[in-house]
Image: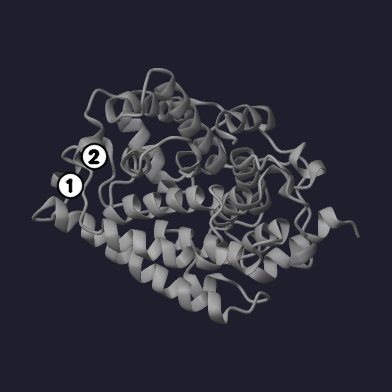
Amino acid sequence: MTTEHTGSARPRTAVKQAATGALTGLALGDALGFPTEFSDLPMIFRKVGPWREMALPTPAIVTDDTQMTLAVARALRTAQARGPLAPLRFTRPLREEYVAWYRSPENNRAPGQTCMQACDALAGDVPWQQASRIHSKGCGANMRVAPVGLVHGLSDTQRAGAAQLQAALTHGHPTALAASDLTAHAVHLLAQGAEPLGLVGLLRSYAYDNRSRYHESWLGDLWTHSQDPSAAHFIERGWDECLAALETLDAAVRTANPESDPCLLTGEGWIAEEALTTGLLCFLLFPEEPVTAIRRAACTSGDSDSIACLAGAFAGAHLGAAAWPREWAERIEYRSELLTLGALWDS
């Protein structure tokens, strides 16, 4: 069996290409998890055999997770071409990209109902805060946020605001916002060279530091569409749920058996904070074995494609483009656009 199919990391190159690595890994995880979503483990193993030997499907078709990630990436590219990333400059192309995805004939990969309902409303003339599904914290909020963590030169406020905004247009729940912010921050830290061993601690510190911060310039009056008495109360609810999820992840990393279903420890990933923590758990179980990490994520009892796409984004941001088997990377759907967008932000 070759190295490329055991999941061992390939040697790091002088130029890491974290953005290309993250986007490619996200798409590969998505394609691995597409056939296993909505299946229990016995059914998955009947389909794919031993999880450590799982093959990339032929053709390597992705889901709405990768499609919407590309939408976010294109919106970032458009916004940055017009000047520094700012709320109004990002909101318009982001809304246009989401509506274009909603209307696309390629939007036939079992998209989430929250995204579909919100995008239908975004296609009209209402303010986006009215289109947002204020009570939804589904993983659609953060399965697409990785590009925000890959953009060079953003301030912490720009990165946090953009991460929360891209979620808020469809998923308005405060936990969706906080989980998206944390997901982008994790991708950013890994792309910048943070060591996986300390990642959970860094994310917990970040969550505590931002717990009461509502990004009004990016989110506007979104919080008033909830039942909360103040903006601070609204956003604190989200950060507190994410902090609880990170505490669960911290314990899971120390005790997890790699042969057991990660969803049993950190959740099935249908909601944003669990997609983050279960995707991170799969990555942290195999931080130097990226293919093994996305195989483990795809062979889970929960939202396998979203969990695996996040695990792939984390692994690719950490190890770079050389992490992925060439034969796999060359077959992934949307390969050309993934490379083009990755090249924008590769260091």
Given the image, on which type of amino acid does mark 1 rest? Trp
Distance of label 2 from label 1 (alpha carbons): 8 Å
Q: Position of residue 28 (x, y in %)?
A: 67, 46
Given the image, on which type of amino acid does mark 2 rest? Leu
The residue that label 2 is drawn on is: 219
Q: Position of residue 205 (x, y in %)?
A: 35, 64
**In the image, is 328 to the left or to the right of 193?**
right
Residue located farthest toward the top when viewing the structure as drawn: 82
Relative vertical location of residue 72 with respect to residue 136 in this rendering, above or below: above
Q: Quadrant of the N terminus?
A: bottom right
- Tell me what residue is drawn at x 58 percent, y 58 percent: 304
Scheme of colours in the image? one colour
Closer to us: 338 or 225 = 338
For label 1, the SS is helix
- Tell me what residue is drawn at x 56 percent, y 28 percent: 344
Q: Position of residue 101 (x, y in %)?
A: 48, 29
**In the image, is 55 to the left or to the right of 44?**
right
Q: Position of residue 338 (x, y in %)?
A: 62, 33
Relative vertical location of residue 245 with respect to residue 33 in this rendering, above or below: below
The residue that label 1 is drawn on is: 223
